[in-house]
Image (cartoon, grey):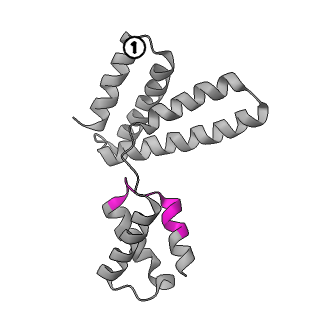
Amino acid sequence: MTLLEQITEDYKQAMKNHEEVKKLALNYLLAQIKNKKIELRADPTDDDVIAVIKKEIKSLNETLLFLEKANKTDEIAIETQKKDILESYLPAMLSREQTEALIDETVAKLWITDLKTQRWMLMKELMAEHKSELDGATVNDIINSRL
């Protein structure tokens, strides 16, 4: 079962169970996935769906920051629930130590001698093979600390 099929089934189940927050979160997510499908002119892959989920989580994080500044506790609780629901569809992310080990392995595999000039090669390889498992910010921090 693809990730999109799983989300669709969970949405149907949320409608049957009258789970309003889950229904709202998944309905919006399905709309964004449909937009991605139109953009791609093909059915989105699991990686495409994961990218949409990550984008929506980032958007929810920004919304939460604004709500915290405005001290809107009720809305904060709803947005946090939506974020938790969306995060449940993401694959497990690699820890910082695992990411460092993967970077070391990839540097050795590609024979990278100068991270400053060959950084693009490392990033291209990492994201091509492990995009759904890696946090781009963590990868960037690790590489910057080694420069």
| Residue 120: x %, y % from top left | 44, 75
In the image, residue 98 lies in the stretch drawn in magenta: no
Q: Secondary structure at mark 1?
A: helix
> Pointer 1: residues within 10 angstroms few (<14), some, or many (20+)?
some
Q: Which residues are magenta?
A: 130-141
Q: Nearer the viewer, residue 63 or 45?
A: 63
Above or below: residue 101 compared with residue 54: below
Query: Which residue of the protein is positioned furthest toward the right in this rendering?
Result: 70
In the image, residue 134 lies in the stretch drawn in magenta: yes
Q: How many marks?
A: 1
| Residue 129: x %, y % from top left | 31, 62
Quarter placement of the N terminus: top left
Q: Residue at x 62, y 26 (%)?
A: 77
Q: Is residue 27 left or right of residue 9?
A: right
**Residue 10 position by quadrant:** top left
| Residue 93: x %, y % from top left | 41, 52
Q: Is residue 26 left or right of residue 81?
A: left
Q: Nearer the viewer, residue 59 or 101?
A: 101
Quarter placement of the C terminus: bottom right
Amino acid at dot 1? Met
Q: Residue at x 43, y 70 (%)?
A: 100
Q: Which residue is mark 1?
A: 15
Query: Which residue of the protein is positioned furthest toward the bottom in this rendering?
Result: 113
Q: Residue at x 49, y 15 (%)?
A: 20
Q: Residue at x 40, y 40 (%)?
A: 36
| Residue 96: x %, y % from top left | 47, 62
Query: Which residue of the protein is positioned furthest toward the front in this rendering?
Result: 97
